[in-house]
Each structure stands twice: as structure tokens, then as C-alpha cells.
Image (cartoon, helix red, strand yellow):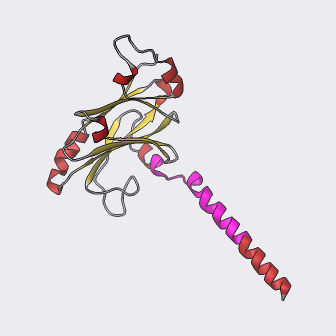
Amino acid sequence: MRRIAFLLIAGLILGGIVHVATILALPATATRNAFARIAAITVPNKVALLPQPVPGETMLPYVDPAFATAVCRFDLARGPLKVRMPITAAYGSLTFYKNDGTAFYAINDRAAGRRLVELDLMTAEQRSALELDEDETAADRLIVQSVAPTGLIVMRALAPEPSALPIVRGALSAAECTQQPAN
């Protein structure tokens, strides 16, 4: 009887370890993650306005239909990026992700405090090589240091009412993700 109880407990523990290991390994082994789906329809360092979500058919997980969404798949190998997103009447945000889906920076339009969210995205090496003019201080520019050379920038803008969605999508389509020359 003790032997059966021991084998049962050992089996449960081993099954639990295998279960946890599988759950933790799954995101790293997924081949059709959001980055892969976006990469199939976008060009690096260009903004692409995503279609409005349809139930069961979304490019990104957890998309709210009240938001217009645009993405920029960035590649900093040839130099930093200048990212610009116009401010809409309700709310807008930019979130920066690594290829594995980990967010490393986010900003909303209220934090930007202007009519345009404008920032520079660069790697640590590009940041250290950056020389600012005498007239320009570090406080004049918003610089985001990327933790990875490639990833996604997700831009979202809220349409407070369904009738405002075309206007918000039009404003978001003016967003830019422009390659800057390497220093």
C-alpha cells in the first residue's frame, strides 16, 4: 500500500513539473505569435494601420474595437528611428515591444503634453554615439533606448463613439516611423 501511495505521489509531482515546464516553454516555441503575424503584412520601419478587429480574426491579442490600431515593425540595424503620432481628441498611446511580446516602454498622449507624440528610438550603442548640438539639450528630446534591435511599436487611438472611428483612423494613419541616418 505504501508503494502505491509513493508511486502515486511521485507521478503527481513529475506530472506537475512537466506541466509547469510546458507552460513556461510555450511562448518561446510559438511560431505564429503577434510579431510573426505582423511581420507578414508590414515593412520594417513603416507604419501600417491595422484593420478593425473582427471576432476571432485579430492580428494582435486583446484588441478593443473602440480603438484604432497601427503598428511599426522596427529594425534599428541601420540607425535610430524618429517616431511621430498625432494626438487625437480622446486618448492615444504608444507601446514598445520586443519580438517575444515583452513590453519595454509605453507613453500616452497626456504624458507627451503636445499636439504630437514625438520621440527617438535607438539602441544603447546608438544612444552613446549621439552627440547633441549646443542649442539642443537632452531635455529637448524624448529618447527611448530599445532593449532589442528589432520589435514592434503599437499605436492606439480611442474613438469615443463609433461615428468618430473614421476620423481617429485618419489621424492615426498620419503616424510616422522614419529611419534616421546612422551617426
Q: Quadrant of residue 143?
A: top left
Q: Position of residue 144 (x, y in %)?
A: 43, 32
Residue that extends furthest to the left in the rendered view of this protein: 163
Above or below 94: residue 179? above
Residue depicted at 25% across the width and 39% down the height:
173
Residue span colored magenta: 14-36
Residue that extends furthest to the bottom in the rendered view of this protein: 1
* 7 sits to left or right of 128: right
Above or below 6: residue 28? above
Front residue of 75 and 143: 143
Look at the magenta stretch and give its main secondary structure: helix
Count all numbered tags in the image, as a single digit: 0
Front residue of 109 and 98: 109
Q: Quadrant of residue 44?
A: top left
* 128 sits to left or right of 115: right
Residue depicted at 60% across the width and 62% down the height:
23
Residue 91 drawn in magenta:
no
Question: Quadrant location of the N terminus?
Answer: bottom right
Q: Position of residue 133 (x, y in %)?
A: 38, 12
* 1 sits to left or right of 11: right
Above or below 126: residue 72? below
Q: Position of residue 180 (x, y in %)?
A: 39, 22
Residue depicted at 43% across the width and 35% down the height:
74
